[in-house]
């Protein structure tokens, strides 16, 4: 299994544990993106876990949606062996 795919599974598991929501994963030839909805009642420890998880990505962000908010993390596939 490629490094990026393994890291993406780990990120998704951490997001799920912190938020209680099911992350979505999108893969392209160049990157893997993992995103998850943020509950409005996210506690302090869960918030720290989300931030720690984001710090393990090549790129990350936070988007507002009509229904709330989403955080996303992207991993580059270029370094996979």
Image (tube, rainbow, N blue to C red):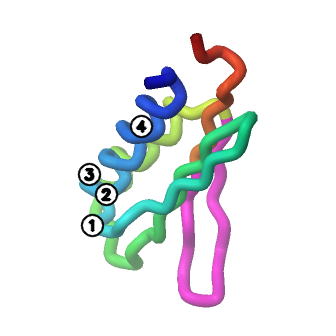
Tell me how far mark 4 sits from mark 2, CA to CA: 13 Å
Q: Circle 3 sits in a helix, a strand or a loop, which is it?
A: helix
Tell me which numbered mark, 1 or 4, is placed earlier along the sequence.
1
Q: Which mark is residue 45?
A: 3
* Residue corresponding to mark 2: 16
Tell me which numbered mark, 2 or 3, is placed earlier along the sequence.
2
**Dot 3 and dot 4 residues touching (CB under 8 Å):** no
Give whichever of 7, 62 is nearer the camera: 7
**Dot 1 and dot 4 residues touching (CB under 8 Å):** no
Q: Nearer the viewer, mark 2 or mark 3?
A: 2
Splitting the image into 4 quarters, where does residue 41 fall? bottom left
Magenta span of residues: 59-72
Question: How dense is the environment of label 4, judged by Cα within 10 Å: few (below 14), some, or many (20 and up)?
Answer: some
Give whichever of 26, 43 is nearer the camera: 26
* Residue corresponding to mark 1: 20
Instruction: Relative to 20, say whether 8 is above or below.
Output: above
> Residue at image x 31%, y 57%?
16
Query: Mainly helix, strand or loop, the magenta region?
Result: strand
Q: Which mark is residue 52?
A: 4
How far from the left and from the top, in percent, is residue 46? 29, 55
Tell me which numbered mark, 3 or 1, is placed earlier along the sequence.
1
Q: Nearer the viewer, mark 4 or mark 2?
A: 2
Tell me how far mark 1 sits from mark 2, CA to CA: 5 Å
**Dot 1 and dot 2 residues touching (CB under 8 Å):** yes
Location of the C terminus by quadrant is top right
Instruction: Relative to 8, say whether 69 is above or below.
Output: below
């Amino acid at each position: 299994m490629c490094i990026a795919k393994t890291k993406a599974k780990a990120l998704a598991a951490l997001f799920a544990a912190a938020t209680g929501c099911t992350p979505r994963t999108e893969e392209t030839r160049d990157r893997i993106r993992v995103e998850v909805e943020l509950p409005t009642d996210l506690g302090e420890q869960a918030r720290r876990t989300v931030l720690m998880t984001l710090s393990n990505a090549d790129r990350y962000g936070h988007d507002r949606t009509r229904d709330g908010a989403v955080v996303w993390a992207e991993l580059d596939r270029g370094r996979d062996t």
